[in-house]
Image: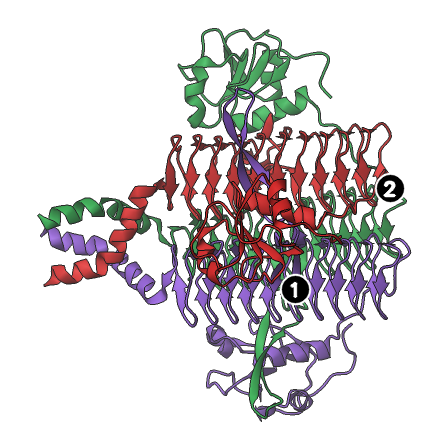
Chain colours: A green, B red, C purple
Amino acid sequence: MKRTSFPTAESIAKLLNGKVISGNKDIVIRNYATIDQAKSGDITFLANQKYLPLLKDTKASAILMAQAFKEAPLGITVILADNPDLAFSRVVEYLNPPQDNVYKGIHSKSSVAKGVKLAKGVSVGIFTVIEKGSVIGEKTIIYPSVYIGHSVKIGRNCLIYPNVVIREDTVLGDNVIIHSGTVIGSDGFGFTLETRPNAEGGREAKRMKLPQRGNVVIEDNVELGANCTVDRARFGSTIIRKNVKIDNLVHIAHNVEVGENTLIIAGAVIGGSAKIGKNVILAGHSGVDGHVTIGDNVKVGAKSGVVKDIPPDTMVAGFPARPYREHLKEQAILNKLPEILKNLKK
Amino acid sequence: MKRTSFPTAESIAKLLNGKVISGNKDIVIRNYATIDQAKSGDITFLANQKYLPLLKDTKASAILMAQAFKEAPLGITVILADNPDLAFSRVVEYLNPPQDNVYKGIHSKSSVAKGVKLAKGVSVGIFTVIEKGSVIGEKTIIYPSVYIGHSVKIGRNCLIYPNVVIREDTVLGDNVIIHSGTVIGSDGFGFTLETRPNAEGGREAKRMKLPQRGNVVIEDNVELGANCTVDRARFGSTIIRKNVKIDNLVHIAHNVEVGENTLIIAGAVIGGSAKIGKNVILAGHSGVDGHVTIGDNVKVGAKSGVVKDIPPDTMVAGFPARPYREHLKEQAILNKLPEILKNLKK
Amino acid sequence: MKRTSFPTAESIAKLLNGKVISGNKDIVIRNYATIDQAKSGDITFLANQKYLPLLKDTKASAILMAQAFKEAPLGITVILADNPDLAFSRVVEYLNPPQDNVYKGIHSKSSVAKGVKLAKGVSVGIFTVIEKGSVIGEKTIIYPSVYIGHSVKIGRNCLIYPNVVIREDTVLGDNVIIHSGTVIGSDGFGFTLETRPNAEGGREAKRMKLPQRGNVVIEDNVELGANCTVDRARFGSTIIRKNVKIDNLVHIAHNVEVGENTLIIAGAVIGGSAKIGKNVILAGHSGVDGHVTIGDNVKVGAKSGVVKDIPPDTMVAGFPARPYREHLKEQAILNKLPEILKNLKK
């Protein structure tokens, strides 16, 4: 719902603990847009230097930046703010307050088992199922068509989007966000070959399913994207520590532990029993072998494959993943190789 | 539902604007099959030259081809048709007309909010939810167990398969097909570090979610496979232009734009704010970095990773993706390297 | 539900057809844990030699192993068992028998079409849809919020987890397990360009959808992980043979055939009409091009891409996938190249 009365650049600066450093502090801001799409009356922002070339042609009336750039158009009103990315989001929320569309209360056509504990302010949407023994914390919102298995514990202020599946015994902390289509607590991929006598008097190996009897524990402030999978542990727990943020289509296998503040980008796959440290970044399409340990503050490049332990505070890339500088050196030589070999022939 | 009366080769040729060029034009065709599985009475086709070696042994009574091949078995009836792939599909539809299994009308156990506008001929399946403010165009079929959020606009003749999630404010054109499990409009993966005073009098960086307030726009004739994810824009729109075809398990991040007629194959991942041109092919498991621009008519090889802008009309491969010829040259040298080094030692 | 009376090491050994070879055979076992988390009174196991270094510090009272290791702590009770992995799972089931949480019977708020055949002992959960003409075998459990299309056949003792979609005409054998979010029978990704006269009197190519009229056949004892996709055949069947085990987020395209006992690890993608042999392993994030044949007993390394036929009994890696030894040799040379070139310059 857009506002009907509008703020000045000066009042936006105040809202952000920022400062108008040039242009007209009394100009009225009616809307917001990206730097290339902004029109007169709009506010925009510059956070990524990649977009600096667009600055001189922006039609915006005001701009949020972390520092003054000489490329800014004449007459534009410049507001300095520490973190223009975040500051701009606040302006957006101010100019266009989010609508509260969530169904309030427990929908009569949801299916909440007897004995399930729903704290104050919980919302449960239509066609959502909550099985016996589960406990849902205050103000948690469970959208329609969610499935929550037996004995699940969910904390406060969580958001569980439509079509999420949370299987039995999963534990979620507070402020956890799970996007649509994500499956938590599916069986780990565990099989073993058992050799047995066969009908012909010999022996044959049969692949047997190893029961997956553990669970998944997700701590506070974790966000999981859409269509991810987090398998339950064989025994014990698959653990995602607090403040971890996970993109879409990411797979976390049984018994994995992901450390605090770690980021995992779309398409990454983590094998069983791997241990990922704190503040790690796993880039898009990266993979981590089972039973591998990655130290704190490690960065794993896009499409890399980690097949052995990585010490903390390193950056790795390639497959098999090796220190980033080695990887770059190899890439550089590979690029020059045709020329080098031509020279050698001479 | 299979037919009970059957056409001749000649009448099939007429149906296809094709021509019987050898064999018996009056032979009756009772069924269809692939070239290796066809039996007497069947029609088959040859579209991919890879299957030419199978031609001489086929047991089919008739075959659709774009040209005459001398390998065709003696006596087989050959029908020439411009596009044997498409022509064969028409024969299949003719011999085995598709059944119309769709529930007609608005199911009494669906949940359509008051004020939702359903045009003539719309079908809404059981357990499907359509939230307030949404508009659905003529003859669009929404299968059971779909979730459609607030203020979604869907055009005419769309097919939305079971368990699709379409979140608030999404816009779909006409003739759009969305396969099961796909999630449209989930939050973009956007976070920023904010430095704040901490309890010990120092400062600490905290990762803050950037609100994702934009939407997703999907134009006419787009098909999206199963279990894909298309994130909403942070502001503005994530856009998929008309005639784009997307395979399964593909991820499209926030603020991406995909140009007309582009094909994206299974397992591909596109990072935030990337711009993909028209008529592009992104092969399986390829990846595109955020904020990168790919020109029109570009082909990106399987498993490649695009990390910088790619000019139009080029073919790239490898990681980082480079021109295809360079990539091939490097691969060739890499293959020969063991021998080259052996010779050098001598 | 944990037990209230507890077995001795000796009685556990009997249960497993194993043998206590050292320590106290009368010690009472109250619980189970992994080797590093076990406490006094617990039983643990050693199956993967990677964890041998943890053995000397374990606090467990008893341990299952396949052979005696001198690193075992003094006084620990050692039980020998052929397959400690499987043996330990049996102990877990014994100490902590699985709870039977499944809803029994046909839920009154499911939607089972008239004429659907449900054998004895079938369970159908709330909000599950089964369309006309489907047949479900004895004791198969269909969890809540599943969608089963028209004319689907499902065998005995299957487990279909919440939010699975099984589209029309799919055939499942006995003892099949399908995890949440998986989609079976979505349309294959098939399009063809058709050239037509356009309005300006010239001709233009239009991409046409090729109807996907085949189905999916999944044989006995197959397990499919969460959020996988298996596309229906264009004609004929996409086939997954018996005992195949598939991890999460795997894509199987139209007309693929996967041979008996094959394992496919998370994130793998298989292109249309590929034929995968028996006892194959496709490691994580591997890819197989369309129309390619992979022989029996082949191992495809993680992140590899198979682009041409692979003979049986081989191991391949890299992209394009080549014999593993060649791949290793190339990797080794690549690693040494910087030094080799330095020496050459001298």
Q: In the image, A298: left or right of A330? A: right
Kind of element beneath mark 1: strand
Q: Position of residue A334 (x, y in %)?
A: 26, 48
Residue picked out by circle 1: C218
The Cα atoms of the two marked residues, 2 and 1, are separated by 31 Å
Residue drawn at the location 52% of the way across and 39% of the way down: B263
Disc number for residue B107: 2
Quarter of the rendering containing residue B196: top right
Q: Amino acid at mark 2?
A: His
Q: Amino acid at mark 1?
A: Ile
Q: Position of residue B193 (x, y in %)?
A: 53, 36
Residue nearer the viewer, A39 or C326: C326
Residue nearer the viewer, A66 or B41: B41
Instruction: Estimate how packed mark 2 is, as few (under 14), some (14 to 19) or many (20 or more) residues with alpha carbons within 10 Å.
Output: some
Q: In the image, C104: left or right of C66? A: right
Q: State the quadrant of the N terminus of chain A.
A: top right
Residue drawn at the location 71% of the way across and 24% of the way down: A97
Q: Position of residue C14 (x, y in %)?
A: 67, 91
Can see residue C249? no
Q: Are marks 2 and 1 in contact (CB under 8 Å)?
A: no
Quarter of the rendering containing residue A196: bottom right
